[in-house]
């Protein structure tokens, strides 16, 4: 045997079966992929060329992670685009190249590793559209979907039991007439539309949709509404409407939002029909007084707060976004307490430096 034959391979990883290599990569945190790709040509090839297989393996092995996506509006040109936390640098939000511009006043909703986009209009023609598309966040590829039954904007969207419910104006000339259209994510088809019952006037809906206990919560300028899809039942919630909640989310069937007037993190329990203030986060919120409006989003069972740094003025140049993760706990007496697990500033560069956060989403990849 020659000396060359006796020499061990300089890259023993290349001898691994591809299936084993996928199993190894599936158990590595996504933020470490840039470094892992430098370890072996095989690892680099699988990460770059086979993301669908890799992320499917992550899901089947229970190693999928929650990932933040943020719809950001450039206030200079009025364009909305998706940004996400950089895999290699977790303290930055980076633009996702190759994705289309998002329609304004449409709906976006996260379902597993997918984001669905419905309706709205684009600033180049201002025409309300019925188009829809999906984004696979494992590969950042876009798939057109069947058109909605009618053009819609100023909508809210919810996902439940394999279906996406899009609620918005039935007639673009009258905002009080609402309709529910349903998209089946398995068959990729639209289902029969359901019109809001007569006698209940719903004005222009805000993008403050929250899903709790199988019910869909939303609001207009004055009232809060609840829709139960299984029975196609509508009702109002006067206790919920007693606060001007917005940019809210649901965590374990409790609604959370930031009261910017009093700088408090409030919660609402729909079962007990009562409001409360989250304790233990006062110091954190004191830091955000000079920031913008705070968005709340459920992040793997924790509550995440997100807002642009630099104040509420849209004329200011901004380069960072405030980010905080909070563990929530209900204690004796019914009080809700929060413990700050992590907070930091995320760098964000938008041409012109003027932006607003429109909608944060969390996908699982």
Image (spheres, grey):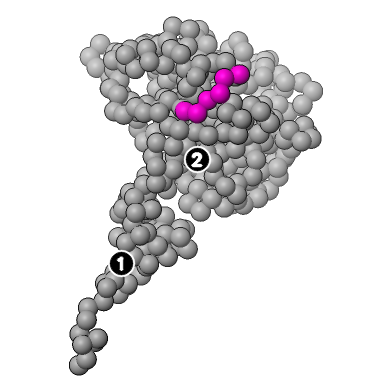
* Label 1 – label 2 distance at C-alpha: 31 Å
| Residue ID at (48%, 51%) | 138
Q: Which residues are magenta?
A: 315-320
Q: Residue at x 44, y 37 (%)?
A: 92
Secondary structure, mark 2, is strand
Q: Residue furthest front?
A: 3
Which numbered disc covers residue 161? none
Residue 26 in picture, x, y percent from top left: 34, 56
Any magenta on residue 58?
A: no
Q: Vertically, is 247 above or below 159?
A: above
Foreground disc of the pair 1, 2: 2
User: Who is closer to the viewer here, 267 or 16?
Assistant: 16
Residue of label 2: 94
Q: Main secondary structure of the magenta part?
A: loop
Q: Secondary structure at mark 1?
A: helix
In the displayed structure, does residue 151 sit left or right of residue 109?
Answer: right
Query: Is residue 295 visible to us here?
Result: no
């Amino acid at each position: 045997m020659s000396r060359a034959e006796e020499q061990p391979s300089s890259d023993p990883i290349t001898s691994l079966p591809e299936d084993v290599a996928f199993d190894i990569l599936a158990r590595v945190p996504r933020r470490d992929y840039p470094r892992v790709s430098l370890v072996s040509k095989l690892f680099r090839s699988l990460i770059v060329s086979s993301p669908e297989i890799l992320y499917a393996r992550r899901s089947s092995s229970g190693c999928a992670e929650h990932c933040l996506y943020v719809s950001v509006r450039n206030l200079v040109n009025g364009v909305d685009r998706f940004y996400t936390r950089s895999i290699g640098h977790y303290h930055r939000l980076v633009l996702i190249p190759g994705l289309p511009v998002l329609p304004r006043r449409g709906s976006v909703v996260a379902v597993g590793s997918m984001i669905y986009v419905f309706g709205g209009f684009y600033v180049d023609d201002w025409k309300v559209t019925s188009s829809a598309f999906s984004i696979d966040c494992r590969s950042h590829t876009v798939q057109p979907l069947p058109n909605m039954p009618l053009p819609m904007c100023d909508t809210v969207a919810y996902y439940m039991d394999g279906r996406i419910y899009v609620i918005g104006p039935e007639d673009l000339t009258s905002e009080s007439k609402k309709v529910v259209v349903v998209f089946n994510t398995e068959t990729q088809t639209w289902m029969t539309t359901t019109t809001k019952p007569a006698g209940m006037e719903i004005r222009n809906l805000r993008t403050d949709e929250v899903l709790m206990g199988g019910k869909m919560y939303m609001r207009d300028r004055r009232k809060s509404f609840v829709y139960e899809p299984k029975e196609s039942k509508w009702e109002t919630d006067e206790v919920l409407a007693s606060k001007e909640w917005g940019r809210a989310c649901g965590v374990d069937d409790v609604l959370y939002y930031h009261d910017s007037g009093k700088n408090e993190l409030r919660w609402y329990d729909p079962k007990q029909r009562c409001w409360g203030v989250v304790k233990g986060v006062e110091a954190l919120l004191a830091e955000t007084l000079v920031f913008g409006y705070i968005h709340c989003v459920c992040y793997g069972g924790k509550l995440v707060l997100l807002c642009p740094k630099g104040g509420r003025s849209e004329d200011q140049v901004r380069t960072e976004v405030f980010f905080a993760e909070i563990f929530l706990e209900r204690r004796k007496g019914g009080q809700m307490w929060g413990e700050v697990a992590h907070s930091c500033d995320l760098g964000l560069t938008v041409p012109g430096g003027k932006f607003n956060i429109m909608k944060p989403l969390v996908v699982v990849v």
